[in-house]
């Protein structure tokens, strides 16, 4: 679950539509807010592609406290 949340948030920050859409099942229902409801991955992909390609798009910043930490060994880690 934590990896899914990280992938979703960082996909938005990175404007990576493919990784974002991979967070959803083929028959997903997304209630985005602002009276926007999307059905299925294709509609979700279309929506986020148009949104993120818009030059006037104010980058949405997901809110949360879930750092992505990859442990390399007992003394090293990479984080984002």
Image: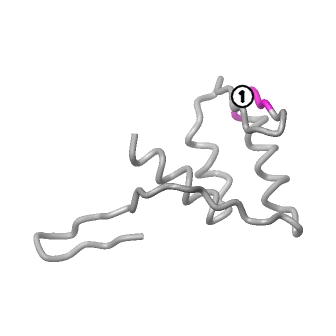
Q: Considering the image in quadrants, where does the C terminus appear? A: bottom left
Looking at the magenta stretch, what is its main secondary structure?
A: strand
Total count of labels: 1
- Residue position for label 1: 40
Query: Mark 1: which secondary structure?
Result: loop
Using the image, determine if residue 37 lies above or below residue 58. above
8 lies left or right of 1: right
Q: Position of residue 75 (x, y in %)?
A: 13, 76
In the rendered view, tell whether residue 43 sits above or below residue 7. above
Q: Point out the image quarter for the N terminus.
A: top left
Q: Who's the residue at 74% across and 43% down the image? A: 45
Residue 73: give x, y in percent of width and height. Answer: 14, 70
Going 64% across and 57% down the picture, which residue do you hit?
A: 12
- Residue at image position (83%, 64%) is 57
Q: Is residue 12 magenta?
A: no
Residue range corresponding to the magenta coloring: 37-41
- Disc 1: CA contacts within 10 A as few (<14), some (14-19) or many (>=20): some
Q: Position of residue 70 (x, y in %)?
A: 29, 64
Judged left or right of residue 67, residue 53 is right
User: Left of 28 or right of it: where is 44?
Assistant: right
As drawn, which residue projects farthest toward the left?
74
Q: Is residue 71 above or below residue 3?
A: below
């Amino acid at each position: 679950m934590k990896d899914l949340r990280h992938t979703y948030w960082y996909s938005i920050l990175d404007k990576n539509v493919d990784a974002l859409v991979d967070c959803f099942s083929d028959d997903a229902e997304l209630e985005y807010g602002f009276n926007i409801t999307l059905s299925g991955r294709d509609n979700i992909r279309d929506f986020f592609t148009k949104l993120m390609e818009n030059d006037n798009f104010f980058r949405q910043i997901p809110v949360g406290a879930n750092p992505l930490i990859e442990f390399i060994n007992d003394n090293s880690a990479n984080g984002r």
